[in-house]
Image (spheres, rainbow, N blue to C red):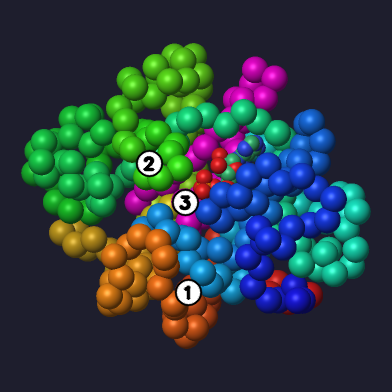
Amino acid sequence: MNSSETYLGKEDAPPGLKCLANGKVRDIYELDENRLLFVTTDRVSAFDVVMNEGIPNKGRVLTAISTWWFAATQDLVDNHLLSTSVDDVPGLDDAWRKKLEGRIMIVQRCVPMAVEWVVRGYVVGSGWKEYQKQGTISGIPQPAGLQQAQALPKAILTPSTKDDEHDKPITPEEAAEIVGQEVFDICETASLKLFQRGTDRLAELNILLADTKFEFGIRNGKVLLIDEVLTPDSSRFWPKDDYRVGISPPSYDKQILRDYLETLDWNKSYPAPDLDPQVLAKVGERYLEVQELITGMKPQQTK
Ligand SMILES: Nc1ncnc2c1ncn2[C@@H]1O[C@H](COP(=O)(O)OP(=O)(O)O)[C@@H](O)[C@H]1O
Ligand SMILES: [Mg+2]
């Protein structure tokens, strides 16, 4: 396999490294007691089910976008990123270097928190459902009369638990109980600042940041921004031109795949259905477009 092919990892692990976890999208290996090798594969999940096929280039796109944001936000909060160079991974032969190039991060090993830090700037998705029922989002009262996809008076933190199956929304108070008030305050402040930075940068590109999810970890008693940042997988990006209050605007993310899946006779649980290669290619193109837009750099698809 060369570097331009889809990489699904897991059963195809780099030699000599202990695998600590296989996430839906990422595989995590131990480098030493302080550092992890974080490999972003081309796996894609929709409705919390990982598909059997990958999206071409997806892992490299996500890595490039997160790397860009880590640099663009390090004045706001310290993050886990140490290096993106395959030269810093010991024991790789040329074939493995090619395969992993562009899709790895060497990161500081953290204790992840059991909370995901979701920030919302608009009332949509599960937030819209709750608002319609009881006028709140994550238990936080909102003004009456909001329409679907309308901007909130100000961005709000709507945390959820990090769960293997389905993430469950919790109130900020519940999040504070889980991580402790002091850590909560740090994560809340950082999440809102990061959201503002993302909103401002994306506005220049005619993209609205509807909502996004951050993760934080603890290293030597310090809170670090971990995982991925402001990618199409962790965020809802709306092209400004398609935005209308009252409808849920089409998103830049996996919407093409979700729409396609809705046309299939599939009950949204395992096993995943077989996917049309043309749809996969189209989603891959979309990811490349988003990368070029955000980072301002043409993606390197092949080496
Ligand atoms: N620096 C870090 N230290 C420890 N764990 C991390 C770090 N950064 C991210 N993680 C964890 O690695 C996993 C990333 O893999 P991913 O495929 O996104 O998993 P998930 O299926 O949970 O979304 C997440 O569970 C995340 O919490
Ligand atoms: Mg994840």
> Circle 3 sits on which residue?
234
Q: Residue at x 70, y 76 (%)?
A: 4
| Disc marking residue 283 | 1
Q: Secondary structure at mark 3?
A: loop
Q: State the quadrant of the C terminus.
A: bottom right
Q: CA distance from mark 2 to mark 1?
A: 24 Å
Amino acid carrying mark 2 in the image:
Asp
- In the picture, residue 144 is in which quadrant? top left
Answer above or below: position of 197 versus 193.
Answer: below
Q: CA distance from mark 3 to mark 2?
A: 13 Å
User: Is the residue at mark 1 in contact range of ligand 1, meaning its CB lies under 8 Å from it?
Assistant: no
Q: Is mark 3 within 8 Å of ligand 2?
A: yes
Residue 265 is a magenta residue: no
Tell whether 178 sits left or right of 221.
left
Question: Is label 2 within 8 A of ligand 1 (CB to nearest ligand atom)?
Answer: no
Q: Nearer the viewer, residue 269 or 181?
A: 269
Closest to the observer, 114 or 105 = 114
Is residue 188 something that shows in the picture? yes
Q: Nearer the viewer, residue 219 or 286?
A: 219
Q: Is residue 51 above or below residue 63?
A: below
Q: Which residues are magenta?
A: 210-234
Q: Depth check: give the residue in front, 83 or 269.
A: 269
Is residue 203 among what the camera can see? no
Circle on res. 167: 2
Amino acid type, label 1: Val
Q: Provide the secondary structure element on which disc 1 rests.
A: helix
Structural crowding at the residue carrying mark 2, measured as other residues with C-alpha within 10 Å and reported as few (<14), some (14–19) or many (≥20): some
Drawn side of residue 148 relative to residue 220, left or right: left
Label 3 sits on what residue type? Ser
Judged by its main secondary structure, the magenta piece is strand
In the rendered image, the quadrant that contains the N terminus is bottom right
